[in-house]
Image (cartoon, helix red, strand yellow):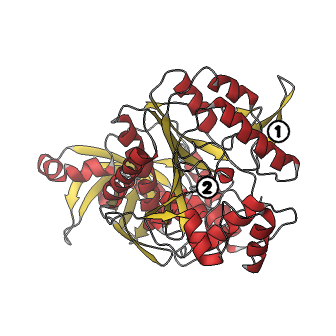
Amino acid sequence: MSSGDEIRDERLKKLEKLAEAGMEAYPASTVRDASNADFLDTFEERETSGDMATLGGRVMSRRGQGGIQFLDLNDGTMKVQIVVQGDEMDQESFKLFSETVDIGDFIEVSGSAYTTKRGEKSLRALSWKMLAKSLSPIPDQWFGLKDEEKILRERYLDILLNPEVRAMFLRRAKFWQVTREFLLDRGFYEAETPILETSPGGADARPFETRHNALDIPVSLRISLELWLKRLLIAGFPKVFEIGRIFRNEGQSREHLQDYTQLETYEAYSDMKKGMVFVQDLYRTIVKEVYGKTQFEINGHPVDFDAEWPEINFVEAIEKEFGVNAITCTEAEALDAARGARVLAAEGDNKARAIDSLWKMIRKGIAGPAFLVGVPVYLEPLAKRSASNPNIVERFQVLLAGSEMGKGFSELNDPQDQRARFAEQQAMRDAGDTEAQRLDEDFIKAMEYGMPPAFGFGVSERLFSFLENRPAHEAQLFPLLRP
């Protein structure tokens, strides 16, 4: 029998002892009347008045023995020291406490504010009761644990025992709160769009597929929020956004996950140039309000969000680095350039995949923040063509620490052009490109009723993981793992 099993058996016996004493081990209610933070905030008043307080929380440590014991009680707001003395409490109650309370238990304690000889603000316990008896011991040595899978699989312990991890997830919540408030303050309508779709679209990605039993039809989990939010522009909403989960049945890496939170915003009567100012403002607001700074070290790149954001031209960068023009080159020339750079990995790769792979090699060396512009039409089926050059689209991507960290463009609102581009994507899909987009007749039908000129932008929780300088899965509360 392992030591863990032995401890569990001992704690099961303590459950029996509590029952024999008439104390519930898992009561439905508590008379807790203050959080630990409230208790400490009003400590001086309570100590002067002698008013009683009832606290509740998890026992995180226990010191002393015999007639006096000290506990650290944590309720998620603060830690408070609890002083338990035999001569201050009913003897039977003190005895039961000594024999049944373990580190990890949730207990309720009533008493008065008391400053110890060492000057620590404490609660002198006069009575107690069990709120939830823990059966498994909290590990003594969690910090420095090398088994990453165990840390992620038991993330609740990681959060409980590692203040840095807890603080990260509080920042994550604030990250999305600041983002939401930024948009609401500017008059955006927050929408909730369908997660199950009959035709997933809005991105080049492979969906998760399932079946809707009630309707007896195949459906997919959404890979983007885009096409539904654009329908709301058609419906007359001038500014819309959604912060929601999307699902892509693709590979996993430091930067990529299969299910994650995405922000998408759409603003009528705006365009790419106005959108650049909007996005700079959004990112700078996030970093200042969440982190209180603008300078970061991310993946070995120094990044300053308050610095100027230069524009980098896609076609010019590839031609300078690899000697091939991304617009005028043939498919054979694009494939040869990609093979020469050793970036083609799959049979059936086409010009679009080859050029995109060349760009990704260049991107790795760009610290940013910067804007990538001048992307060819064949790489972006949903953006408006440039008025000055119909071979490129009015699209930018935010470049940050060697990666793409958000994409915005002047939205395509010509239904005939949209149909033609969807048809090109469908042809690529029929030829074996499983990430190419589908021909979405329903969306084109909606566009034919008229869609205003608009700017659209999307960024995922990857931005948060980059600001934390952590792999994407570590910045999620409970990343998906094999059973």
Amino acid under disc 2: Phe
Q: Residue at coordinates 19% horizontally, 68% vertically from top-left?
A: 119
Residue closer to the observer: 302 or 310: 310
Judging by the rendered image, the residue that carries numbered circle 1 is 210
Q: Is residue 101 visible?
A: no
Q: Is residue 436 visible?
A: yes
Where residue 164 appears, as percent x and y from the top left, is 44, 67
Where residue 393 appears, as percent x and y from the top left, is 57, 49
- Identify the mark nearer the N-term, 2 or 1: 1
Judging by the rendered image, the residue that carries numbered circle 2 is 478
**Label 2 crowding class (10 Å Cα cut-off): few <14, some 14-19, many 20+?**
few
The quarter holding residue 182 reads top left
**Alpha carbons under labels 2 and 1: distance apart:** 23 Å
Amino acid under disc 1: Thr
**Label 1 crowding class (10 Å Cα cut-off): few <14, some 14-19, many 20+?**
few
Q: Residue at coordinates 67% horizontally, 36% vertically from top-left?
A: 418
Q: Residue at coordinates 45% horizontally, 41% vertically from top-left?
A: 271
- Under circle 1, the secondary element is strand
Location of the N terminus (image quadrant): bottom right
